[in-house]
Image (cartoon, rainbow, N blue to C red):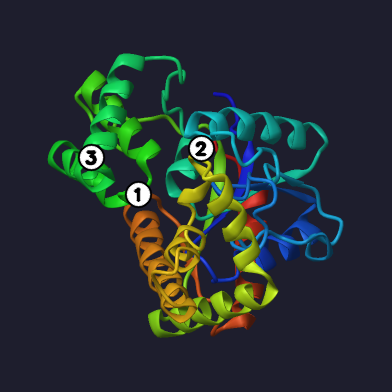
Amino acid sequence: MTKLKKVLVIVGPTAVGKTALSIELAKKLNGEIISGDSMQVYKKLDIGTAKVTEEERAGIPHHLIDCRELTETYSVADFQKEGRQFIEEILGRGNLPIVVGGTGLYVQALLYDFELGSQDESTEIRQEYELFAEAHGNKALWNLLQQKDPQAAESIHFNNRKKVVRALEVFDKTGYSILQPKEKPKKLYDYFLIGLETERSVLYNRINNRVDIMIAQGLLKEAELLYKNKTQQSIQGIGYKEFFPYFEGKETLAEATEQVKQNSRRYAKRQLTWFRNRMNASWWDLVQTPDSILELENEIENWLDSSEG
């Protein structure tokens, strides 16, 4: 039996400390980091996506960050293909791949042999749903998904039209949820999955504070850039479209900011639900018990010393 290759994975909701942990572990374990975030691929969206800064990177190589223009699309299939290429390259250099992110479907598609198909398939089905959304709106399209595939609908925000269309397309083609294909997907790597969490009230306070800091750092400039360009996929990120009513004079800045905080808190809740229900993680609260990192590092060492076929 072929021995599976080692990949360390860090998941969890926004504002829970994934970036800091990943860099600390990368320094100790000869690691290189692969971003598993669907928005950090976009250039110029630095603040709203909480992109790791050059200073924070501390010389650790980071991949799948700033690899798309604002006008380009980026799919699960793109991430799956490019992420696996980077895993092989990192292993080839004798280093440890560390996948870090909060986009659950991306991480799952990377680690298992999900057949996502090419983006050129089923153009007719896709166009039909795109036209439906143009005529009736994103919420009506999402309602269709909820009727056909409630499991997928639970994990996809109704404004993320691209993912909603893709989930409908997969269901129409196969009769199965994009999250639960007919055949159980095969595990491709011997991965150790670290899940970061903290008490809900603590997490929500951290999210609220992070939004205030982002605004002080210039988040509005990034939001205005997307508002002026009105690009398709990249405007879906939380922390951008909420400011559009403010730019149009329909809301105050305080109202728009509160909407960002609320949507960010809801997204964090969805992220936690996804990882708890879909993937078997080793859960840690390093926010309230930072000393437990020593125990975590011990678990990682044991995993690195073990082998899985």
Left or right of 271? Residue 158 is: left
Q: Nearer the viewer, mark 3 or mark 2?
A: 3
| Residue at image coords 61%, 74% | 215
Name the one closer to the observer, 135 or 37. Answer: 135
| Residue under pointer 2 | 111
| Mark with earlier residue (1, 3) | 3
- The residue lying furthest to the front in this view is 249
* Amino acid, disc 2: Leu
Residue 111: x and y in percent read 51, 37
**Which disc is residue 159 wearing?**
1
**Which disc is residue 141 wearing?**
3
Tell me the crowding category of disc 1: few under 14, some 14 to 19, or many 20 or more residues within 10 angstroms, Cα based. Answer: some
Name the one closer to the observer, 136 or 183. Answer: 136
| Mark with earlier residue (2, 1) | 2
Q: CA distance from mark 2 to mark 1?
A: 26 Å
Q: Nearer the viewer, mark 2 or mark 1?
A: 1
* Amino acid, disc 1: Asn
Kind of element beneath mark 1: loop
**Which quadrant: the N terminus?**
top right
Name the one closer to the observer, 113 or 73. Answer: 73
Quarter location, residue 83: top right
| Residue at image coords 50%, 76% | 207
| Residue at image coords 76%, 62% | 53
Residue 268: x and y in percent read 42, 66
Tell me the crowding category of disc 2: few under 14, some 14 to 19, or many 20 or more residues within 10 angstroms, Cα based. Answer: many
Q: CA distance from mark 3 to mark 2?
A: 29 Å
Residue 211: x and y in percent read 55, 75
* Amino acid, disc 3: Leu
| Residue at image coords 30%, 15% | 124
Quarter location, residue 4: top right
